[in-house]
Image (cartoon, rainbow, N blue to C red):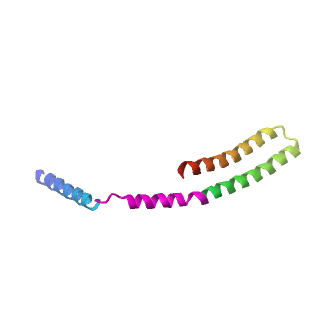
Amino acid sequence: MEKLTKKRGLSGLLLLSACVAFAQGNGTAGINEATQMVTSYFDPATQLIYAIGAVVGLIGGVKVYNKFSSGDPDTSKTAASWFGACIFLIVAATILRSFFL
């Protein structure tokens, strides 16, 4: 049993030393490439969030108009929730873009 433990320890040590030998570079090229790839997605993602906000706003406007036309008493609550959702989407997209770029 002691012999098996020594073999496992030795093989683990060899594996660790091989991993260290292959990981000698500082990795700045990979980090820079990953950063460029992530930042290249922000403009399309921001435009997508703005488009989703516009669609949500239009749907909310129609829904509020239907409630107002039918005389529903909680029209202001619905209007406030849809307006808040649109404002949140726009502000979240702007803040995320300015935070990461």
Q: Is residue 62 magenta?
A: no
Q: Is residue 32 magenta?
A: yes
Magenta stretch? 24-44
Where residue 37 appears, as percent x and y from the top left, is 49, 61
Q: Determine whether 80 is above or below 5 in the image.
A: above
Where residue 7 appears, as percent x and y from the top left, is 15, 56
Left of 51 or right of it: where is 11? left
Q: Residue at point 73% right, 42% down? A: 81
Q: Determine whether 70 is above or below 38 in the image.
A: above
Viewer-nearest residue: 34 or 73 = 34
Task: From the image, give the main secondary structure of the stretch colored magenta.
Answer: helix
Where residue 66 appears, as percent x and y from the top left, is 84, 48
Q: Residue at point 41% right, 58% down? A: 31
Q: Residue at point 84% right, 48% down? A: 65
Left of 64 or right of it: where is 94? left
Q: Quadrant of residue 3?
A: bottom left
Left of 52 or right of it: where is 27? left
Q: Residue at point 58% right, 49% down? A: 98
Viewer-nearest residue: 28 or 14 = 28
